[in-house]
Amino acid sequence: CRALCAQGHAVSAFHRPTSNLKLLEDLPVSHVLGDLTQPASLESAVEGMDAVFHAGAQLGSAPAARMYAVTVEGTRALLQAALEAGVKRFVHTSSAAALGIPAPAVAGRRILMDENHAWNYRPDYWPYGYAKYLAELEVQKAVARGLDAVILNPSVVLGAGDLYRQSSSIVVQTARRRIPVLIEGGVNVVHIEDVTTGHLAAWERGRAGERYLLTGENLSVPDFIRKIAAIAGVPAPAAFFPAGLARGLAGWIKLAQPFLNLAVTPDQLRQAGQYFYFDNRRSREILGMEEPRPADEAIRAAYDWFKAVGAIP
C-alpha cells in the first residue's frame, strides 16, 4: 500500500474490522471492511478495481480446516469476484513454501529450487505450505477462465513492520536468547523491500499464469542464527542438535505443544536438515529484479523495528 500510494495510485485496503491498522494509519487509502471467508464482502471490494494484490492468508499453526477455509476457499472466492468485476491484473502472494521441500543433494551439491519445482511433501506435515500450494491451483484455474493473474513466492521475509510476529519471529527469539541450539539446514532470507518491489514489477511485467520466486540470500541455518546474534549483540548458541533427532521428536512435541512455549514449531522440526535454497533467475530476467539486498540488511531492518516497538527489550 505504501509503495502504491507513493506512485500516486488510488488504493483501497481490504481488511477485517479487527485488523491492526498501525502500518496504514498515515496512508491515504480507502478502507474496505470484509473477510476472505465472506464472499459478499469480496464482491463489493473489487468492484471498479484495475488491479488486486491478494496478500491475505491464514498464518501460524491454525487447524487445517481453518487454513483451508481462509487460504484456499478465500482465494477461490476472491478470484471469482475478480473475474466477475473485470479486474485487469491479479497479483497473488503465495509463498516459497508452496514449492514443497528440496530434492536431496547430488554428490554433496545442494539443488536450488526454482519455479518448476512441484509440491512433494505430506500435507499433514506442513498444512501452511500445502494450503498455499492448493491456493495456487485455484489461481491457475482462474487463469484458464480468462483472469490475468500472476503468482509470487517469497521466501523468509524480514524487515520492518512484522506486526503479527513480534514474539514468534526468529529475530526476536534469537535476540532474547531463546534459541538454545543450532540445527543443520538451510534457509533463504529476503528483504521486505525487495518483496514489495517484486509485487509492483509483477503487476507491470509478469506473465499471466507464471509464478515468480522473490528470494534473497541462501544461508545455512547456523549461519543465519549467528548473523542475527551478531546484530543483536548476544552470544550465538554453541551446541548442535542432530537433525535426525529433531525430526524424530516433532510428533511428540506436537502433542505437547499446547503446554509448551517453544521457539520452533513441530512442522519446522520435521524439516530439520533440509536446505531451502532457491534460484531467482526468472524474477531477474522477466520482472527485471536487481540483485537482492544481503541478509544482514534484512536482519538489521527487522531487529531495529522490533526494538523500536518494544518486542526486543
Image (tube, grey):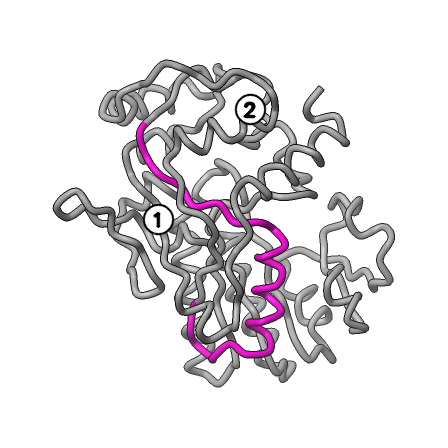
Which sits in the foreground, 163 or 238? Answer: 238
Pointers 1 and 2 in contact (C-beta within 8 Å) = no
- Would you call the spot at circle 2 few (<14 residues within 10 Å), some (14-19), or many (20 or more)? many
Quarter of the rendering occupied by the N terminus = bottom right
Percent position of residue 34, x then y:
71, 57
Is label 1 in a helix, a strand or a loop?
Answer: loop
Q: Is residue 72 above or below residue 164?
A: below
Point 29% across, 20% down: residue: 249
Which sits in the foreground, 175 or 168? Answer: 175
- Residue highlighted by disc 2: 173
- Residue highlighted by disc 1: 277
> In this rendering, which labeled residue sits more in front, label 1 or label 2?
1
Residue 203 in the magenta stretch? The answer is yes
Quarter of the rendering occupied by the C terminus = top right
Is label 2 in a helix, a strand or a loop?
Answer: helix
For residue 146, side relative to residue 175 (left or right):
left
In this view, which residue lies farthest toward the left?
A: 107
Which sits in the foreground, 254 or 43? Answer: 254
Q: Is residue 11 above or below residue 277?
A: below
Tell me which corner region of the image, top left, top right, bottom left or bottom right, holds residue 119: bottom left
Percent position of residue 273, x then y:
28, 33
For residue 155, side relative to residue 231 (left or right):
left
Point 36% across, 14% down: residue: 239
Q: How many marks?
A: 2
Tell me which corner region of the image, top left, top right, bottom left or bottom right, holds residue 302: top right
Percent position of residue 68, x then y:
46, 51
Q: Is residue 23 above or below residue 45?
A: above
Q: Amino acid at mark 2?
A: Gln
Q: Earlier in the sequence, mark 1 or mark 2?
A: 2
For residue 290, side relative to residue 103 (left or right):
right
Point 53% across, 64% down: residue: 290
Which span is picked out in magenta?
Answer: 184-211
